[in-house]
Image: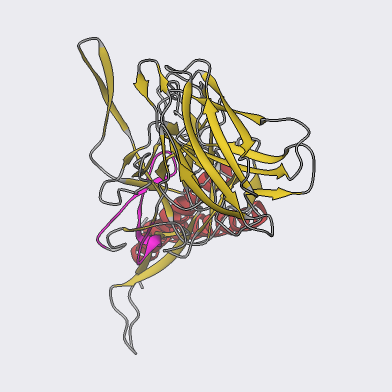
Amino acid sequence: MSIFGALDTSVSGLQAQSSAFTNISDNIANSQTIGYKGVNTHFTNYLVQSMASNNGPDSVVANPEYTNTVEGTITQSSNPLSLAINGNGYFNVSLPGPTTTTAGKTTQTFDAQQYYTRAGDFTLNSSGYLVNGAGAYLDGWSVNPTTGTVNTSSLAPIQVSQGASPPVPTSNVTLSATLPTTPSSTPVTTQVDVYDSLGNMQPLNLSWSPVTGSANTWTLNVSSPNATPSTVGSATMAFNTNGTLSSITAGTGATSPAAGQLQISPSYNGSAQPITLDFGAPGSTAGLTQYAGTSLNLQGVSQNGSPSGAFSNLSIDTQGNITANYTNGFSKQIAQIPLASFASPDALQNKSGQIETATQASGAATINAVGGSGGALVTGSVENSNVDIATQFTDLINAQQAYTANTKVVTAAQQILTTTVNMVQ
């Protein structure tokens, strides 16, 4: 190897160690960055000539070695919308583009490029989007609020409408009670509160009277003071000798859609509202029964209506289901968060803000529901940087020593060249 060859080799060593310094400084600077993946340095030598009788000068090149598959520590967060992935997988995210305004309405557009990240410190912004601390918008599958069907064919930024939840008119009432065999007074009554189509609470009065001359048989009359007319419907209810319900025979203004059920249609706000009263399956002790006593014993009443409610908050479960909650107690699932997986995640291309893009080496993303790619969601938590400070300081010392050693070779080669030049004087 010539002196000039030694100089070239040492210079390549200085350049390689400079690259190592860059990676180390990046890692140390981002040791507290959520979702950051450290970059190690891999050194490779390049030979010009190497034979038994002659070894020519070579050089060294520093290549980045990504650690995307090395998980950072998962820690609990005070933000309930924060998410961490335990295992394989990435969040699908989009970057915002310019906003457009049409007819006074401003719409956010997004970059067509799909991005991926492990930084799950999401919060709800003023436009109702879930955005992480680096400004990436979380993508998900939309959910039909009526059927609960998940649209897995379309991945888009999740936007939450923070408007009021419309009222839900009552369509089903389930009642559990015990009628007395020897009532102290008749009729025996109870009241059930239901909601109309405008969210107003409406009382339904249920009155039972024993049928004269017919043992274990009662007449039920249902009325509502705000309905038009106030008399809603009636039925005859028979009980078995063991006290369980035997049958329901619908009377005026009512039908019996199934055994143990009575359907009425009170008119509120100018329109009929079908309501099914469910008294339990015949022969069951879980619904309406008749046992010894002098007064009605009401065990429980439930109904499926609700008044209008304001948006309260979001909740996310470990399956990635996003649910909007309202002040009226109503909840609805609005989206589902899938995870992306890759054949070679270390080959993803790093971008600013702890995001990556797919490359030919990484392979295309496979999008699955949580658990389908091996990863699990940890709610109310974040994944910290996977950088180990102690390891970085050790690497820093090694890089410093190697850089200094290469400068010594350059100095020695310069001195030898100077000596050689001085030989002709």
Please determine whether, in this image, residue 159 is positioned above or below residue 225.
Answer: below
Observer-nearest of 111 and 272: 272
Q: Tell me, yes or no, if residue 324 can be seen here.
A: no
Residue 341 lies in the magenta stretch: yes
Boundaries of the magenta span: 340-360
Residue 372 in the image, given as x and y percentages of width and height: 42, 63
Residue 220 in the image, given as x and y percentages of width and height: 56, 36
**Quadrant position of residue 413:** bottom left
Observer-nearest of 99 and 287: 287
**Quadrant position of residue 301:** top right
In the picture as drawn, the residue positioned furthest to the front comes out as 213
Observer-nearest of 346 and 117: 117
> Which residue is at 66% across, 30% downward?
189
In the picture as drawn, the residue positioned furthest to the bottom comes out as 52
Residue 103 lies in the magenta stretch: no
Residue 392 in the image, given as x and y percentages of width and height: 60, 54
Observer-nearest of 108 and 413: 108
In the picture as drawn, the residue positioned furthest to the left comes out as 102
Q: Tell me, yes or no, if residue 176 can be seen here.
A: yes
Left-right relation of 30 to 373: right
> Which residue is at 52% across, 55% downward?
403
Left-right relation of 42 to 389: left
Q: Name the quadrant of the N terminus.
A: bottom left
Please determine whether, in this image, residue 134 is positioned above or below residue 422.
Answer: above
Q: Name the quadrant of the C terminus.
A: bottom left
